[in-house]
Amino acid sequence: MGYARLTATIALPPVRGSLKADAPLAPLVWFKAGGAAQWLFEPKDADDLSDFLAMLDPAVPVMALGLGSNLIVRDGGVPGVVVRLGKPFAKVTALDATTLSCGGGASGILVSSTARDAGIAGLEFLRSIPGTVGGFVRMNGGAYGRETRDILVECEVVLRSGEQVTLLNRDLHYTYRHSNLTDGAIVVSATFRGEPGEPGAIQAEMDRIAAAREESQPLRSKTGGSTFKNPDGHKAWALVDEAGCRGLQLGGAQVSEKHTNFLLNTGEATSSDIEALGEEVRRRVKEKSGVELEWEIQRVGLVK
């Protein structure tokens, strides 16, 4: 087992949720590839997570997993504890005419739909992001001209130490697809604010976004969302296309012909295939245009 050499077997704290050893992660991520988590923890509530982390050996790494839409889990598996926020963290409720309270495990579709039903506009863009609130907050997730920093009021976070803290928007020091949340910190809830709107108009905007995404992105494939960040003054997909990478294959991995900033698992690709293809694309783009593409997809775990 790839992670065995990194983390010795230790006694784990008691939990009220679910804790599984050697848990396969491939079924939980969009690419449907990669190794297992040394431990997979689905806490019952924020206090369960907080207590567990407070008692867990500080040397053990901790990582949050949302919908796994923007993630490559390497074939050697993920050492330490992977935390997945399940149903207890997937609730969304309207607090007032413009504000929503959202669990860290709630999907973008649920958030935007709840906002629509409450007549709250400005959150429609979340309909198009295949992720959870925790991921949006950490990565400043965005699409169609809007970002998480445009709607976030505050978030509740459990730090690696187990401490529960409330952070305001300004505390996260947002930049493009980045916040200053520390490693091991897990967003358990967030408060989003929009503006008053008419449910019919909000639904029309959600439909427009969904149609645009369906037309331009390979949604029916085993993929991982946008692979590379857009460099200043450039579109990543255009740089990849200009470098002749449309349809490029390596093992079971392929650059999408529909949208060149997406990588695909065409069948039995390993995570090594997918990551190596991404690196080859980066090399060709650098050679062609001089631009160094940065990964937007997170790559975690150990090479097998």
Image (tube, grey):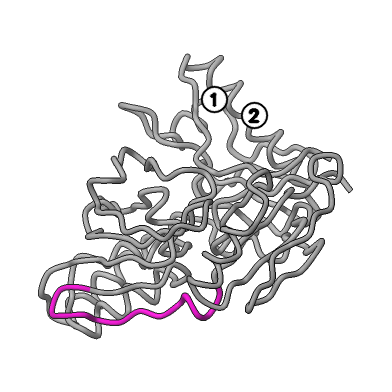
Residue 90 located within the stretch drawn in magenta: yes
- Using the image as rendered, state which of residue 192 and residue 197 is in the foreground: 192
Q: Quadrant of the C terminus?
A: top right
Q: Which region is colored magenta? A: 86-99
Q: Is residue 186 left or right of residue 208?
A: right
- Residue annotated with mark 1: 243
Question: Disc 2 versus disc 1: distance between alpha carbons?
Answer: 13 Å
Q: Residue at x 84, y 53 (%)?
A: 9
Which secondary structure, mark 1? loop
Residue at position x 35%, y 79% in the image: 92
Name the spot of residue 176 as percent of width and height, x first: 34, 39
Residue at 38% across, 34% down = 235
Q: Is residue 218 above or below residue 232?
A: below
Tag 2 residue: 279
What residue type is disc 1 on? Answer: Ala
The answer to whether residue 242 is above or below residue 184 is: above
Q: Amino acid at mark 2?
A: Glu
